[in-house]
Each structure stands twice: as structure tokens, then as C-alpha cells.
Amino acid sequence: MAESVVSFLLEKLSSLLEDEVKLVSSFRNEVVFVKNELDRIRAFLRSADAKEDQDEEIKVWVKQVREVAYDAEDIIDDFLYRFEHTKRHGFYGYLCKMARGIKNLKARLRIASQLQSIKLRVTDISEGRLRYGYKLSSTEIGSSSGTKPCYYSEVRSDARFLEEAQLVGIEPKKQALLSFLVKDTSQLRLAAVVGMGGLGKTTLVSSVYNDSRVKNHFHQLQAWVNISQLFKLDEVLKQIIQQFFKAMKLPLPDEVEKSTDTHFLKITIVDFLSDKRYLVVLDDIWDVDAWEAVKVAFRNNNNGSRVMITTRIADVASSSTNDLGGGILTLDPLSSEDSWTLFCAKAFQGKACPSHLKEISREILRRCEGLPLAIVAIGSMLATKDISRVGEWGIVDHSLWVKLQGNTRLKSMQAILSLSFNDLPYHLKHCFMYLSFFPEDYSIKRHVLIRLWIAEGFIEESEGRTLEEVANGCFNELLNRSLAQVNDRYSDGRVKSCRVHDILRETMLLKSKDQGFAAITNNKSSKRLPERVRRLSVHEGTNIDASGDNQLSQLRSLLIFTKEKDVWNKFMSSFSEQGSRLVKVLDCTCAPTTTFPQSITKLYHLRYLCLRDTAVSSIPPSIANLRHLETLDLKNTLVRELPSEILRLQFLRHLIVYDYKHYSITQGFKALKGMKSLSSLRKLCNVEAKQGETEPMVSVGRLTQLTRLGILQLGAEHGDALFSSIRELKLLRSLTLDSRTEDEALSFQFKSFSSLRLLQRLYVIGRVEKSLEGLQNLTNLCKLRLSGSRLQVDPLESLQDLPNLASLHLHEACDGESLCFKAGTFLMLTELYISRLENLRRVTVEEKALSHLEHMFLFDCKLLKEIPSGIERLRNLQQLKLVNMAAELTTTMYRGSQHGNYSKVMHIPRVFIGQWSPKCGGVGDWL
């Protein structure tokens, strides 16, 4: 982790040195010296980070490196705050410069003294690098972090030899693997078992490996190798050879035992297994490179051989099965019933839970979230507690993170879960640790998280990729490594939000506290903040004193997740008084305030400001002081106008101002003249066009970096200027166009969309004067909503061949009497909404149309008397909703299976028929 901190600082130092104007010449030598020394130190930090838990001297040295890096970053940011200013010219500029020079003389002297101090500390740390070099050089380095605690291999061995009675909830998956292994096929096949650490992958595979049916099927010609992060190819190959020779009761050749030639060892395995049926288990593979290195040893000998692997990395599972064929078995957490069975087996030695401990046991078990490793570890610890003393059990529930530090069993669990973190490249460690910043069970929105990472400086722009694209790749990598779990998806399949397993979160909180990364306050935390707070997350129940001298002076990030007004006032007051001028991130979602805090506009370094879901109604002109602001999030506030001074924010990337209720956008903000000056904007939503003014629409065409754009209150007079501008926005992924009135038809020039090759989501609200011709060119389009279009032609004709369309919403979209989904069309569509088509009488689904449809919703189509013809062909349909339909349709569906209508939908798992109104909501039945 210290490597991450130093790497982050080195990037900042490099950027500073490149800008000669910013750096006072007398400071330059000091900055160069510090940078060079830290660059040398960084080479040692990877192994030092891995070994600090095992060696107290190394731990102290790593802590010193981390602290000096933090202090150096503070000095640099303070320097920039004090000496970078708005440029003025002429005599007035000269006078301003003179005044600032006198005012900042003391500050210059203090910063110079601080840099000298940093220089001395770095020199001392460098000597420490030489002093402890022998310890660091002896550390074996894995794929990215190095060694594991000595008890890790013992824990893995224990997982292989658990008694059958201890294996809870694995029987269905065990039978699936058994069937796969002994299946009568001669081809070599591979089974990959994937999931987060602690789910029981090794336990499951070991149970299958030791099953008598497997041993008989492979004539005991089996090999089990732990791969892990300490991957050495020659040792892995030797272990396979040794186990196979032992199974055949053959002596191991001397040349094999002494060889380090991996090519020779691979040939030995291939030759030896050429006419044999065998089973190999590769346990705990951490990267695709390790699989690529070892896979050559397994050739298809057409004898029905099998390979099984376990991994936490989804890419490893997919890569290996693509190479050898086979399948992926993804492990899920245990069910509530199985979790309780396992917990009682450990905590009460298989006896029933005493009635007075049931409630607290359920609460403790809830935090385990079905993770077998956590259930076993915590249950075993509780087995040592006196069951008559409820208070001892309550302490475990309220202070689990403390117990993680002090209990041997829980420390082993923590070490296993930490392996995934240790394996991360340095740029991902900060990103992952940030997830623990959010409250327990919090649904973390992907877009919000990405913007936060960027504002924190965790993301580097790479050639050909924007910051947002790189950050999205980091997000996907955390999912790929089973470190975050998908919590919700958009209808087009994109991940909407994620969450972190609570036990893994607790583990990261310990690491975060130990390494000074962040502090979290809630009803369980201390009433005093730590001495050095760089990132602060304020949760519900916070009751701390934040008024100490300079407690928040080094604060970089403040995220507030409480609606308690007293807490809000306390933090805003101390925040202002202590002058937390280094803050870069301020997220006040749902804060109990009606006014924009003026103190915020003094935060020179602020990059991210979120006040969404608050009652703030106006933004002051002084927001122009936030020269480095990248994100301004005012979603679901009362803000309807922005000051023209906001156009000075040259670094603004995300401007989010709109009200979103009942699944639709109700209001945005009034367009400003001169928006073209915001040339860095990537997200602009949602701006309201002004009646009779076209200049803002022309300005939009100059914002060529936009990936998302929303324009409301459009009128016919905006058409030409708007569509001329849209042609220039070649990076757009999402576009919303909303007309001013329902009666005024707009001349939507969809042919002008031909340049929007990357467009994925299109929302058109309002009357469309002509057809949809031109939309068929949007080959990347995956979500389309047409609302109030009232087309006189069949919209499906223009949409049926879109190759990636996954979600289609037709709301008051056409006036025709029928919709026909023709054979072989809409092959990728998974979600279909049809609502308020007043003249619709028939919906037809021809053979092989809508073959992937999972959800169909028919709403408020009063003349539709029958369910869609051909719906029985939709074998993937999971849900059908019929709401506010013709009385005849509802009646025949309710009568039962003797009627044709009902029998056609019997294959659909969820069918709903009912009524809906704004006053009473939905009323109906699931059939």
C-alpha cells in the first residue's frame, strides 16, 4: 500500500516539475531530490509491503515512507494553494503581485523549511532501505505483492481434509462436478470453480477429488497442486510429475528431480500421460499468465482426462475453459438455512442454539453473508464463549473489527481475504480500499464511484483512453477479481451498482485505519477523530467532536452519509473554521441543508462536489473560485438556474443538474449562453433550451468531448441548430431529447445521427414529424425509448435490424392498430415495454423473433383484447406484466388453463395481471 502512496506522489511531483511556471526556483532542487529518492525507495516497497506484517522493523520503515509521502503531498498542495492565482496584466496586475509577495513571504519561508525537513526525513529513510535491504531481498515476490503469512498454506490444507459432516450446502455442486468428471466423453475437459476468497472453492473441489467414484474412474492417477501467488513453473511441473509417478509406484528419475528446465518437464508430463486417463487439480490460480504457462502440459489424449482449477479471477476461469473446453461453476454464498446449520455446528458443536442467543446469533450470522470461511471462523471463536453470558456475544457483534485483530482464528480468515487485496496492482489498491468508505450494505453506484476515483487522482489517463474509460476498466477488474459484487444492472445489461461483502469490508477498514488511508465515524466509533485525517466518511449515528485544532487541516475527502442536522452543522462549522483548504472531494448526498454553504467556494483544490438529493435551490457566483472542479452533481435538488460564472470552470467534466422522478426527467437547468467554453465537459444533463434562442444549441456542438447529453424543452425553432451540433458529437454514448409540448411536432433529423457510431442509449420524448429512418445506422444502440412520438408508420420497420438493441420502450409511440415482430428480428432484445398505444389491437410474434426476450410489459393498451400472438414461442421469457388492459383480456386470463390465452403463458415463471392508478398504485395478481 505504501507503494501506491509513493507512486501517486511521484506522479504529482513529475507533473509539478514539468510546469516551470508553478515552481519557485529555490524550491526546485528540494523537489527534485525528494522525487529521486522516493523513486529509488519505490523499487523496494513491493516486497516491503508484503513483509511488513511479519517483521516489526520493516513495518516501521514502511510506515515512515507512507507518512513522509503524505506530508510531502500536503506541502506541495499547500504551495499550489498559496501561490497559484488568477493571472492579471498591466499595472494593476503588478500591484497585486507586489501585495501577494509581501503577504506570502512568511508562507514561502515556512514551506522552504518544511521541504528541508522532508529532505532530511527522506535521506534517513533511504539509509533505512540500505539497512533493511538484506531482509527485503530475501522476500520472495509473487505476481505483485509477495509472500503470504506462514499459516496460509496450513489453512488451505485444512480445507482439503474437512470431515464430510462439516461440508454444508455443497452437495448439489459436488454432484454437478462428479457428473462432469466421469461423463463418458473422451475429450480432455476442464472445470473451473470461481468465486471470492472464503466461499469454499478448495473445500468443494477437494471433496470431489477424494470421492471414491473419482478415484476409481481415474485409477487413482491424480495430482493436486497449489498454485497461489508464489507461482514457480518448474516447481509446479515437478509436483505433478512426482504425484503421478508415486501413483504408478514408479521411482522418480534423477534428471526430473534435478531439472529446472520447464520445457523438459512439460515434455516429460506429456509423454508420461499420452496413453493414460488422469485428473489434475490446480488450486488457487491468480492470473491468466500462470494458466498460460502450465496449460501446455495437458494434451488431449482422447482418454477422458480432466483438469479442475479454482480461482478468484473470472478471466482465469473463462480463459482456461476456452482453451480446453468444459464449464465454469460459480460459487455463491450459502443460503440462510445452510448458513445457520454451519454456524450451529461450529458455535454449539452441532447442538441447537439456546433460545436466549438466537437473536444475537442471527445478527452475527447476517454479517457473514453466507461466506463459509467467516461462518466457520466466527463460529469457532464463539464456541469458546460462555453461552450463559449474552454480553460476551454482544461484544463480538458490535466490535467485530476489533476481534479481527486479536483472535487467531479470525486473523487467519483476515489473511486469506487479504490475499486478493495484496495481489492487486498498486493503482487498484486505492480504488478497492475506497469501497470500504461507504456504509455497510450500501449500494455503490458505478458512475459515482468512477467520478470519485478520478477526483481523488487514483486514475491515470492512458494513450487512446479517457479517464472515465480507464476507471471503468478498474471497476470491471474489481468485479473480475471477485472483490466487488454486482448489486444491480440497467435494463441493457450494464452494471448500475455494486457492493462489498461485509467481512471483506471489515478487513479493509482495518487496513485503512492501520495505513492512515481513511477514517469512518458512526455510532460504534470513537468520539475523537484520529490525529491525522486524510479522508473522512461520516455515517449515521455519528457523535464525535470535530472541533479540535487542525484536526481537519489535512483533510482531502469528506463524504457525508447522514441526514442528522446537528452532525451536518457541526462538520460544516469546523470545516470552515479550520480552513480545510486541501479538500478535493466533498460528497453531501441527502445532507439536511437548504442553502449552498459559502465556505465550500474557498476550497481551491476541490474537484468533486455533490449535493444531490438536498433542498439546495441556488448556486452562488463565487463557485467560479473552484477552478479545479471536475464534477458538480446537483441531481434531485431545487436548482433550476446556474450563474454564468460557472462558465469559468475550465476543468468541469460532469455537470449534472436535473430532477428525476417516477422514472422520468421532470426538470433541468436553463441554458447559458457561451456553454462552448466548458470544453472539457463529458456529461451535460440536463439543459433546458430557451424559447426563441438557438445560440446554446450551437454552443453544444463545440463540446466535442461529450459522452452524455440531455436537452429538454426543445421547440421547433431549435431543430436545425440542434441537429447540426449533434453531428459533431462523435463520442456520444447517451442522448436525451425532450420537446417542450406534446402537441408540437419536431422535425427530428435522425439521418444526422449517422456520425454517432458510439451511441448506446437514445431517449426521444415528444412528437416526431417524420419516420425513424436513419436510426438503423446506429449499430451500437442498445437502449431506445420513444415517448409521445405518435408516429403514423410502424416504428418496428426502422428498428428491427439493430444488432445490439437490448431494451425497447414504446410509450405513446405510434397510432397503428398492430405491431408485428417479424421472423428473425430483434434477436438481442431482452426487455420490451409497450404502453399507452391507444389504437393497438394486435401484437404478433413470428417464429424466431425476440428469441432472447426475458421481460415483456404491456401497459394501458385499452383495445388489446388478446395476449400477443406467438408468445408461447418465447422460451426465454421470464416475466410478463399485463396492466390496465381490455376487460376481455383480463377476464379470459383469470378463468384458468382451460382457455387458450392462459395456456400460452404457462411456461412463463412470472405473469402479472392487474390495474394501476396514480392514487392507489398497482393492484393485481401473480398467476
Image (spheres, rainbow, N blue to C red):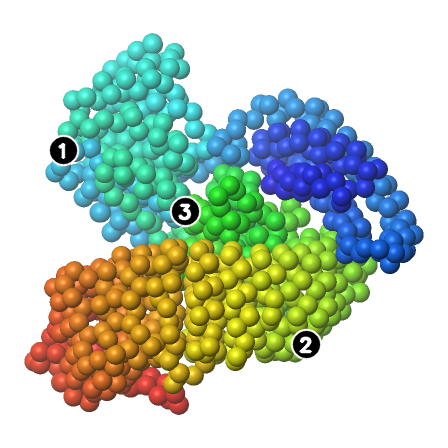
Disc ID at residue 186: 1
Residue type highlighted by circle 2: Thr
Q: SS for tag 1?
A: loop
Residue appearing at x 73%, y 58% in the figure: 604
Residues marked 1 and 3 touching at CB (< 8 Å): no
Name the one closer to the observer, 329 or 85: 85
Mark 1 or 3 closer to N-term?
1
Q: SS for tag 3?
A: helix
Name the one closer to the observer, 795 or 874: 795
Q: Residues within 10 Å of mark 3 (few under 14, many from 20)?
A: some
Quadrant that contains the N terminus? top right
Residue appearing at x 37%, y 44% in the figure: 314
Residue appearing at x 60%, y 36% in the figure: 49
Residue type highlighted by circle 1: Ser
Mark 2 or 1 closer to N-term?
1
Residue appearing at x 28%, y 77% in the figure: 791
Quadrant that contains the C terminus? bottom left
